Amino acid sequence: MSGVNLTAWILNPLLGLMIFLFIFRIVLTWYPQVNLNHLPFNLVAWPTEPFLIPLRKLIPPIGGVDITPIIWVGIFSLLREILLGQQGLLTLLT
């Protein structure tokens, strides 16, 4: 297995997992009574919060709605497509 294949093999599930976690985080924003410090919700909050904190400083909530998880879903989806899509950089190198 070449280095490019190994990188793609690791990045694909990792980026997919992050997209899933951010989508789940978006759904959790619909339920403000959910405590993100307790299981199983902290399993979603722990890996996503380091990405959300700096972006929240740049983009405050709009009308009381935090849109930063939506932005991160777009960023990770774009990154996944650029690197691993049908004409992605890592796909073309293999």
Image: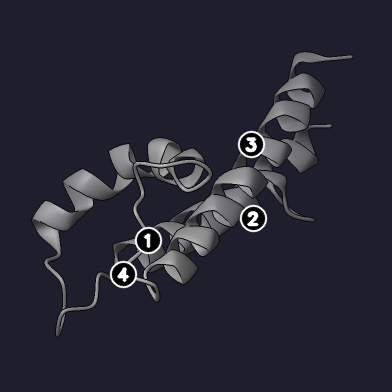
Q: Amino acid at mark 3?
A: Leu
In front of the other: label 3 or label 1? 1
State the CA–CA distance, disc 1 to disc 2. Answer: 32 Å
Q: Helix or strand or loop: what does disc 4 sit on?
A: loop
**Residue at horizontal 44%, vertical 65%?**
28
The residue where tag 2 is placed is 81
State the CA–CA distance, disc 4 to disc 3. Answer: 27 Å
Q: Which mark is residue 34?
A: 1
* Quarter of the figure that contains the N terminus: top right
Marks 4 & 3, CB-CB < 8 Å contact: no
Q: Amino acid at mark 2?
A: Glu
Q: Residues within 10 Å of mark 2 (few under 14, many from 20)?
A: some
**Residue at horizontal 10%, vertical 53%?**
57
Among numbered discs 3 and 1, the one appearing first in the sequence:
3
In front of the other: label 4 or label 3? 4
Q: Residues within 10 Å of mark 4 (few under 14, many from 20)?
A: few
